[in-house]
Amino acid sequence: MEKSKEVTKKVVLEAVRVMAQDMADIMVGDVVVTADDVIDYAERTIAQIENKNAKARERAAKAKAEGDVLTQAIEAVLTDEPKTIAEIQDEVGVEDATVAKIVSRLGSLRRDGKIERLEVKDAATGRKVKAYVSITE
């Protein structure tokens, strides 16, 4: 048997809505629940789920667009001269460019083959630090 899709709240409510069409009125405690009540509730809840999902997609698209701005700024800063994360952060000019965000974007750029990571010796401390350069083709 082929594996079915994940059973979500929306799928369950769709099933309840379909089953309720053939349902007789039932007594739950002191309340009489009709098939129309169940169908209306299921449809209203499904609409709420769809609205919530649409808003989540919008927020994700906005976050991705903002991330793209930072990625483009990092690409513009990098040259064939090695730069450390601190240097990149100073030069990108994006207000909320935290070290974590920069490291994440550098990882993505590196996986895409656009930059390369090197280890260079810090002149001030003598320690090895990671530096990044643009790969020019």
Image: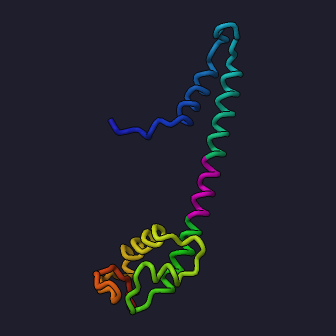
Q: Residue at x 63, y 57 (%)?
A: 58
Residue 97 location (% of width, % of height): 54, 72
Q: Residue at x 70, y 28 (%)?
A: 40
**Closer to us: 102 or 37:** 102
Colouring style: rainbow
**Closer to us: 77 or 21:** 77
Query: From the image, which quarter does the N terminus lie in?
Result: top left
What kind of secondary structure does the magenta stretch mostly adopt? helix
Q: Residue at x 39, y 71 (%)?
A: 107
Measured along the vertical axis of the image, is residue 100 above or below residue 11? below
Residue 33 location (% of width, % of height): 68, 15
Measured along the vertical axis of the image, is residue 34 above or below residue 126? above
**Which residues are the magenta region?**
53-63
69 with respect to 83 (left or right): right
| Image quadrant where residue 24 sits | top right
**Closer to us: 52 or 96:** 96
| Image quadrant where residue 119 sits | bottom left
**Closer to us: 28 or 102:** 102
Measured along the vertical axis of the image, is residue 4 above or below residue 119? above
Query: From the image, which quarter does the C terminus lie in?
Result: bottom left
| Image quadrant where residue 92 sits | bottom right
